[in-house]
Image (spheres, rainbow, N blue to C red):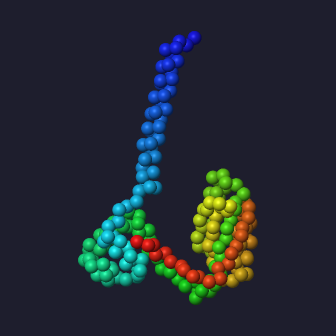
């Protein structure tokens, strides 16, 4: 039979275990949470560099440095720091899709039939492999994903959707809106 002092010490031990467990969890997730919530302090010089790079990333380094009033080596050091910090993710070439025959663009909202992790991962892996899918966003609300899809024409869109997207076992439903005109299309962030 347990005495009152034994029950108290068991409760005390359990309380200590819970406190220690919470402290361990905080330490484990501290770095992860710090990465998710950390916003790097960007100096005014860094802002000038980022604006110049977004405006015309194809300029030579010397031209970019001159446009923000810096030496080439100082400019390069700042750019490297911004890349290392993950602020500059990549540099890319943008093509005119219409001029290379990709005239049809559509937004497609997808609902999947299960929200289990394995189902989501299966769907996302499948979508990442589709070259006509330019973007895929997980969304909140009534649908699960928003896709941006490009194709040469309505026939190729239909073929791609019916054979490579809609027949995937994770998809419950899909609704498409075709893009009639582009009013604004930018990747330039406000700084």
Residue 169, horizontal then vertical, whole percent: 73, 60
Q: Residue at x 70, y 68 (%)?
A: 165
Above or below, 41 relative to 56 = above
Residue 79, horizontal then vertical, whole percent: 34, 71
Above or below, 114 relative to 14 = below
Residue 111, horizontal then vertical, whole percent: 69, 62
In this view, the residue farthest toward the bottom is 99
Q: Residue at x 67, y 54 (%)?
A: 115
Above or below, 132 relative to 8 = below
Residue 151 as seen in the image, left or right of residue 76: right
Above or below, 115 relative to 56 = above
Quadrant (top left, top right, bottom left, bottom right) of the N terminus: top right
Residue 28 as seen in the image, left or right of residue 150: left
Residue 60 as seen in the image, left or right of residue 168: left
Q: Is residue 188 visible?
A: yes
Residue 106, horizontal then vertical, whole percent: 65, 76
Q: Residue at x 63, y 52 (%)?
A: 117
Quadrant (top left, top right, bottom left, bottom right) of the C terminus: bottom left
Q: Is residue 62 visible?
A: no
Q: Residue at x 70, y 78 (%)?
A: 157
Please identify the quarter of the rendering in which residue 98 is found.
bottom right
């Amino acid at each position: 039979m347990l005495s009152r002092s034994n029950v108290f010490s068991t409760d005390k031990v359990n309380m200590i275990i819970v406190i220690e467990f919470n402290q361990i969890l905080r330490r484990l997730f501290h770095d992860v949470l710090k990465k998710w919530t950390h916003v790097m302090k960007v100096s005014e010089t860094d802002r000038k560099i980022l604006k110049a790079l977004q405006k015309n990333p194809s300029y030579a380094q010397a031209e970019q440095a001159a446009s923000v009033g810096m030496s080439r080596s100082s400019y390069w050091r700042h750019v490297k720091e911004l890349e290392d910090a993950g602020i500059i993710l990549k540099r890319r070439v943008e093509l005119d899709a219409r001029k290379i025959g990709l005239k049809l663009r559509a937004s497609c909202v997808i609902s999947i039939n299960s929200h289990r992790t394995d189902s989501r991962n299966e769907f996302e892996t499948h979508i990442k492999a589709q070259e006509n899918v330019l973007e895929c966003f997980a969304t909140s609300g009534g649908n699960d994903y928003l896709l941006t899809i490009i194709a040469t024409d309505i026939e190729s869109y239909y073929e791609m959707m019916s054979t490579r997207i809609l027949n995937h076992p994770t998809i419950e439903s899909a609704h498409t809106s075709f893009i009639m005109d582009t009013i604004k299309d930018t990747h330039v962030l406000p700084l």
